[in-house]
Amino acid sequence: MGYFAQAAQILLDCLFGIAIFLLVLRVLLQAARANFYNPVCQFLYKTTNPVLMPLRKLIPGWRNIDIGALLLAWLLSAIKLALIYALFGQRLGLLGLAVMAFADLLDFVLVLVIGIVFVRVLLSFISVERANPVVPLVYQITEPLLRPLRSKLPALGGLDFSPFVVTLAILLARVLIVAPLLDVGMHLAQAA
């Protein structure tokens, strides 16, 4: 692997990662019914609307989930993987690429949720102004995951163990779901 190929891979991961991050965060905030007037939400809507509004005419949302944004994030993940593998002289079959892109996107979402849960844990230990526009969004995204566990887990010494359980479940999902999907996708991609 040459130095330029490694540098190109870093740039591709970064550029596509930013676009996928914006799309996935928008989907998560819409699913959590975040306040539309929050400055972070306004930024997300203004940056993603030029692409998603025309797409929404073709692909309607389902409940509070923007299917068009998810499909676009999946497509960007597939393009990123195809370009990265092309850098190293490998071609991927379409079916394998589709499965690998799905696994890559799922892994991205899981890692993002772990990060948001971690931010919530940090916010519980430090004093942060509630007027900060990020704070309510972190709570809105994580609360549907933590609330069901919080009622079932005992609070030992006033500590909330639900973030630990959610993080553990996500780490297990990465090993038991994402990794096998990537293996299947790689097998299909190389068989083509």
Image (tube, rainbow, N blue to C red):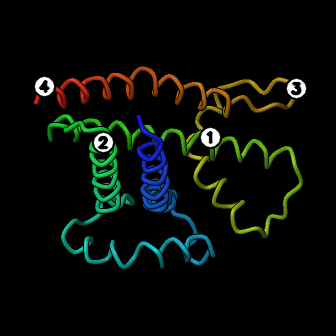
Q: Which residue is mark 1?
A: 147
N-term-proximal mark, 1 vs 3? 1
Instruction: Point out which mark residue 101 bears.
Output: 2
- Report the residue at 46% width, 42% height from top: 6
N-term-proximal mark, 4 vs 2? 2
N-term-proximal mark, 2 vs 1? 2
Q: CA distance from mark 1 to mark 3?
A: 18 Å
Q: Quadrant of the N terminus?
A: top left
**Residue 116, percent from left and from top:** 63, 47
Q: Which residue is mark 4?
A: 191
Local secondary structure at mark 2: helix
Select label 4 or label 1 by which is in front. 4
Q: Which residue is mark 3?
A: 157
Q: CA distance from mark 4 to mark 1?
A: 44 Å
Q: CA distance from mark 4 to mark 3?
A: 55 Å
Local secondary structure at mark 3: loop
Residue 20, quarter of picture: bottom left
**Residue 83, percent from left and from top:** 30, 49
Q: CA distance from mark 2 to mark 1?
A: 31 Å
Local secondary structure at mark 4: helix
Residue 115, quarter of picture: top right
N-term-proximal mark, 4 vs 1? 1
- Report the residue at 31% width, 50% height from top: 74
Give the side of residue 25 with respect to residue 152, left or right.
left
